[in-house]
Image (cartoon, grey):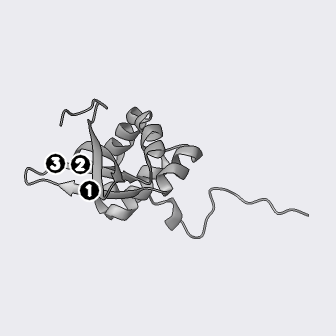
Amino acid sequence: MLKMIDPYDFEDEDFLKIKPISKMTEGEKLQRFKRFFDSSSRAMLQDCLFRIVNYEDGTGTLEILCPNEVVRQRLSKKKRKITNNINTCWSHIRWFSLCVQQDNELHCQKFTRNGDLVAS
């Protein structure tokens, strides 16, 4: 016989507590950022490296280093999703860059929070 479990009767309610973004580490924020994507986008993002460049004025850029140009092109089609997800994780990030390394040089396309390409 199956035992029914009352979903409102938990001995340990710690798992229900959601950590506020202000108390998350950068790694936790990055994991949160990735969770908002569909599985195919998460698979692409898993092969990428991330860093946040912070500026003296308190703003920053999320740089996404793509493993190759194909991934960078695919992610560039998801600019709106990227900016929406940045907004849910970081308040100070004003730009994001999709980068790829070619011939030992980093080539980046920088975008605003609206997904507009920033002129170099």
- Residue type for callout 3: Thr
As helix, strand or loop, the secondary structure at mark 2 comes to strand
Determine contact: label 2, label 1, CB under 8 Å. Answer: yes
Can residue 14 be seen here? The reply is: yes
As helix, strand or loop, the secondary structure at mark 1 comes to strand
Residue picked out by circle 1: 52
- Residue type for callout 2: Thr
Q: Is 5 left, or right, of 67 in this rendering?
A: right
x then y, percent, for residue 100 = 36, 50
Residue picked out by circle 3: 59
x then y, percent, for residue 16 = 51, 59
Q: Residues within 10 Å of mark 3 (few under 14, many from 20)?
A: few
Residue, x 44% and y 35% (percent of image)? 78
When the figure is inspected, residue 3 is found, relative to residue 74, above or below; the finding is below
Determine contact: label 3, label 2, CB under 8 Å. Answer: yes
Mark 1 or 3 closer to N-term? 1
Distance from label 1 to label 3 (Cα)?
10 Å
For the view shown, which residue lies furthest in the left direction?
56
- Residue type for callout 1: Ile
Q: Which of the two residues, 19 or 105, is positioned nearer the viewer here?
A: 105
For the view shown, which residue lies furthest in the right direction?
1
x then y, percent, for residue 72 = 42, 43
Which quarter of the image is occupied by the N terminus? bottom right
Q: Which of the two residues, 105 or 120, is positioned nearer the viewer here?
A: 105
Which quarter of the image is occupied by the C terminus? top left
Q: For residue 70, which numbered disc appears in the image?
A: none
Distance from label 2 to label 1 (Cα)?
6 Å
Distance from label 3 to label 2 (Cα)?
7 Å
Quadrant in the rendering for residue 119: top left
Residue, x 61% and y 65% (percent of image)? 10
Q: For residue 61, which numbered disc appears in the image?
A: 2
As helix, strand or loop, the secondary structure at mark 3 comes to loop
